[in-house]
């Protein structure tokens, strides 16, 4: 009974953090890294993923991401390991440097960020020191620059994409998603705008847009973009939907909501 009580408490507190019910500092100050390990063992996969993503969001909001030099080489969009360790402690996700390092290693092993100076499994290790790391989202964005025309700013790609992609109410199962678009439409728009020459490259660009927070999977927290009839929705902050009208599209499925 005592073991189940602890497990249920871990699950409840972690879900509250992930869902925003309580601040990280108030709910996690007494929980050590072992709590995360216990959760992995007893919680559902969605609970575990949600908890780690809440921690990563806290890191992203509290760390300075900038271009830095390490061993005479410049690395773009990085943060410092010691800063991340301090942030984990300040936010209440760890109670000591050792706990912060252990938690940082768990995040790295799950590929939420990587060591920019190393490759392979060595890049999935976290240290409390002047080691440079890059969030996976930022890493993906940088990797699509070779696809974009020379001199193209990522912000320009995002803005033109939002102006062009056809959005309308779409039905998925029993649920209607307002102002949604399909993956195949997004890929076609990227090619039409001249940001990619092939559907494979356009899919990579769309993944970069998704990683940057431009849009999300409709009705899901999945972070993988697919060149398919999967529905996606733009974040409200990225586009004002007031007064938006339905846009016709050759890809619109027959189950689309009738006006």
Image (tube, grey):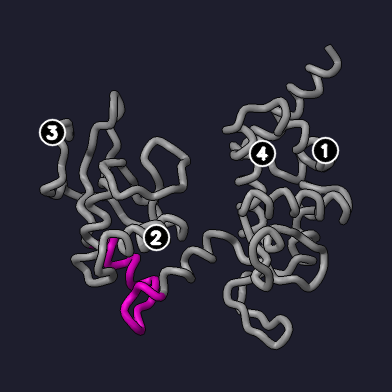
- Residue 61 coordinates in the image, percent (x, y): 62, 59
Is residue 155 covered in magenta? yes
Does the residue at mark 4 contact the one at mark 2 (Cβ under 8 Å)?
no
To which residue does mark 2 refer?
A: 209
Q: Which of the numbered marks, if any, corresponds to residue 34?
A: 1
Which residue is nearer to you in this view: 140 or 199?
A: 199
How far apart in space, not on screen, are marks 3 and 4 (Cα)? 40 Å
Q: Which of the numbered marks, if any, corresponds to residue 17?
A: 4
- Residue 206 coordinates in the image, percent (x, y): 35, 58
**Who comes first in sequence, dot 4 or dot 2?**
4
To which residue does mark 3 refer?
A: 254
Q: Give, as a single range, the part of the protein colored magenta.
A: 146-163
Q: Quadrant of residue 199?
A: bottom left
How far apart in space, not on screen, are marks 2 and 1 (Cα)? 35 Å
Classify mark 1: helix, strand or loop: helix
Residue 59 visible somewhere in the drawing? yes
- The crowding category of the residue bearing disc 1, from other C-alpha atoms within 10 Å (few below 14, some 14 to 19, many at least 20), is few
The residue positioned 76% from the left and 54% from the top of the image is 88
Is residue 162 covered in magenta? yes
């Amino acid at each position: 009974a005592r073991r189940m009580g602890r497990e249920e408490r871990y699950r409840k507190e972690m879900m509250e953090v992930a869902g925003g019910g309580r601040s990280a500092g108030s709910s996690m100050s007494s929980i050590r890294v072992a709590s995360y390990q216990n959760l992995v063992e007893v919680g559902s996969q969605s609970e575990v993923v949600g908890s780690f993503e809440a921690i990563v969001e806290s890191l992203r909001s509290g760390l300075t991401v900038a271009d830095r030099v390490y061993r005479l080489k410049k690395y773009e969009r990085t943060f410092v390991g010691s800063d991340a360790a301090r942030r984990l402690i300040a936010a209440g996700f760890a109670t000591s440097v050792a706990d912060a390092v252990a938690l940082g290693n768990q995040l790295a092993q799950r590929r939420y960020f990587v060591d920019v100076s190393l490759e392979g499994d060595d890049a999935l290790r976290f240290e409390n020191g002047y080691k440079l790391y890059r969030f996976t989202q930022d890493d993906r964005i940088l990797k699509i620059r070779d696809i974009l025309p020379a001199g193209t700013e990522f912000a320009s790609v995002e803005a033109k994409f939002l102006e062009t992609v056809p959005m309308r109410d779409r039905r998925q199962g029993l649920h209607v998603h307002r102002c949604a678009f399909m993956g195949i439409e997004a890929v076609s728009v990227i090619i039409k705008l001249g940001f990619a020459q092939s559907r494979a490259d356009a899919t990579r660009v769309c993944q970069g847009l998704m990683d940057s927070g431009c849009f999300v999977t409709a009705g899901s927290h999945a972070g993988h973009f697919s060149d398919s009839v999967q529905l996606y929705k733009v974040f409200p902050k990225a586009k004002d939907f007031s007064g938006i009208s339905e846009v016709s599209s050759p890809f619109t499925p027959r189950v689309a909501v009738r006006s």
